[in-house]
Image (spheres, grey):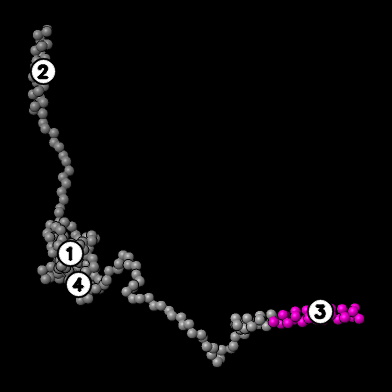
Amino acid sequence: MKKIAVMLLAVLMFCVPCMTAFAAPTEQKGATISTTVPAKCDITFISVGGRIEEGGTDMDGTEEFDRRSVHTFHIIPDEGKEIDKVLFGGEDVTSQVKDGYFTTPALTTDMTLEVIYKDAGTPVEPVSEPTSKPDTSKPAATSTVSSAPVQPSANTPASTTPSTPSTDTAKTGDTTAAIVFVIAAVTTVSAAFIIVLAKRRKETE
């Protein structure tokens, strides 16, 4: 019995790999994704106040170009105008404009080339104005006040302010008052002396 069991086990071990090797392959199904890349790209030109050329041909409205192609456009302002700003695809590319020519990168999608102009010779406003300094090269004007007395005009009313007496007049008045005081003192003393003499004469008689 043991020999029979061993033989059956050996047969099974031999048959299982064979069944696996001859199994039918499983069919796999998956989705296929495909994309179509456009062969052309459009550029819309906006240039009010000038024109845009390529190889002598005016670019106006929307033009079609090959995908991955590179183009150089000549920007020509009208008389009295000059380039102020250039936008390509909404991006400011003014710094890339050389002598009125702008070269695009390789086109991969539709774009817009817009040129904005301004009046020629328009000055750029300074960020801050310089502080003005006084001109020191010219001597400052000096005002001269005349020392001559101002003569009143005929129509000017005379001043009502009393005039101040001069120093000489004041001295003369002081001297006169002193003389009058001395005379009055002498007169008083003389009168008193005369009265005293008169009393003594009466007493003597």
Q: Please, what is the dominant secondary structure of the magenta stretch? A: helix
Which residue position is annotated with label 2?
12
Disc 2 marks a residue whose amino acid type is Leu
Cβ–Cβ under 8 Å for marks 3 and 1:
no
Tally the marks.
4
Which residue position is annotated with label 4?
77
Looking at marks 3 and 1 on the same chain, the residue that comes earlier in the sequence is marked by 1
Looking at marks 2 and 3 on the same chain, the residue that comes earlier in the sequence is marked by 2
Q: Nearer the viewer, mark 3 or mark 4?
A: 3
Judge left or right: residue 22 versus residue 134. left
Looking at marks 3 and 4 on the same chain, the residue that comes earlier in the sequence is marked by 4
Is residue 22 shown above or below 74?
above
Which residue position is annotated with label 1?
97
The tag on residue 192 is: 3
Label 4, residues with CA under 10 Å away: few <14, some 14-19, many ≥20: many
On-image quarter of the N terminus: top left
On-image quarter of the C terminus: bottom right
Q: Nearer the viewer, mark 3 or mark 1?
A: 3
**Residue placed most toward the observer, 174 or 18:** 174
Disc 2/disc 4 C-alpha distance (Å) = 93 Å
List x then y, in percent, for residue 81.
Answer: 22, 73
Disc 1 marks a residue whose amino acid type is Val
Label 3, residues with CA under 10 Å away: few <14, some 14-19, many ≥20: few
Residue 176: name its quadrant.
bottom right
Looking at marks 2 and 1 on the same chain, the residue that comes earlier in the sequence is marked by 2
Q: Secondary structure at mark 2?
A: helix
Residue 139: name its quadrant.
bottom left
Label 2, residues with CA under 10 Å away: few <14, some 14-19, many ≥20: few
